[in-house]
Amino acid sequence: MTDTYRSGFACFVGRPNAGKSTLTNALVGQKIAIASSKPQTTRHVVRGIVTRDDGQLILIDTPGLHKPRTLLGQRLNDLVYETWSEVDVVGVCLPCDQRIGPGDKFIIGEIAKLEQKPKLVALATKTDLVSKERILSHLVDVAAVAEELGIEWAEVVPCSATEGDQVDVVRDTLINLLPEGPQYYPDGEITDEPTETLIAELIREAALEGVREELPHSIAVMIDEILPRPDRPEDKPLTDVFATIVVERDSQKGIIIGHRGSRLREIGTTAREQINRLLGTRVHLTLHVKVLKEWQRDAKHLNRLGF
Ligand SMILES: Nc1nc2c(ncn2[C@@H]2O[C@H](COP(=O)(O)OP(=O)(O)OP(=O)(O)O)[C@@H](O)[C@H]2O)c(=O)[nH]1
């Protein structure tokens, strides 16, 4: 044990579905970032905070890079580059069950080009899905990529976030790479995202479930109101949440609502359970669906939706 206190910021990068959100959750020990089986659902900058006696790690969840076809795409990409230059460490998630491809190399190359470069850690994620031999050959590929791109991995850690395997090593590794610094956040702080944003993300996650072909980026959620229901017994509080699911087209509205409202009811049930857990009280959730044509291209709409 040394008395050095280390603190700073880290974020994870990697292709869609690489396991970034799941690893963030595993490190923090509580669901904060939104994990989903659909690619590219993480859009908001959500911070998870790990506080220990020897340091504090602040995890920032960034959206993935993609072709900037809309104003939203552009803003998201700017945010990504900005985040990369601001953090101390970037964990590059390279899932063991997939070969390292041009997409991975592109991301690593972009970080390597930054003037203000973070330290790079390679995280060979999802080790539980493959054999020991495959993990080894994957680690060889990971080392080869560094050579090819002229970068250096500060560390390489194989891990499985779902099995909790080596998650403690990832945590130690990241904290050890942070500079000496103060404890930025008080003990017990898990995220500084406002509750509203977390609730909106939970609803959005539920709305995306089962929508296979549609682009996830066509859905946004606005929280209209969160109100404690008056006249409730103290031991049985109830919170009313009113939210609007925003889509771009009438056809998408139909998909969200479903046959006689069946899908919207399902979304409501799933989201409500999650919000119950987040708020720790029973929740009554009222959802509306609204078409805002071309919201992704319109600066006024983007600002209102918090981008
Ligand atoms: N078997 C296994 N599955 C995992 C592991 N980590 C994540 N997954 C699964 O992989 C899928 C994607 O995980 P996410 O954490 O949402 O991935 P992400 O990189 O944040 O994805 P985007 O938000 O799309 O960029 C989910 O279905 C996870 O349950 C792991 O260690 N083992």
Image (tube, rainbow, N blue to C red):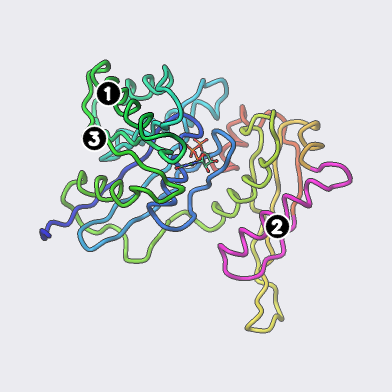
Viewer-proximal residue, 91 or 286? 91
In the picture, the quarter occupied by the N terminus is bottom left
Residue type, numbered disc 3: Lys
- Residue 47, placed above or below residue 67: below
Which residue is tagged 1? 112
> Magenta residues, as a range?
257-286
Q: CA distance from mark 3 to mark 1?
A: 10 Å
In this rendering, position of residue 295 left or right of residue 127: right
Q: In the rendered view, would you say 299 is above or below 191?
A: above
The location of residue 130, given as percent across then percent down, is 44, 34
**Most foreground residue, 179 or 155:** 155
Q: Residue at x 56, y 39 (%)?
A: 303
Q: Secondary structure at mark 1?
A: helix
Say left or right for 51 vs 256.
left
Q: Main secondary structure of the magenta part?
A: helix
- Looking at the rendered structure, the secondary structure element under dot 3 is strand
In this rendering, the label closer to the viewer, 2 or 1: 1
Task: Give the residue displayed 62% in from the left and 30% down from the top.
Answer: 296
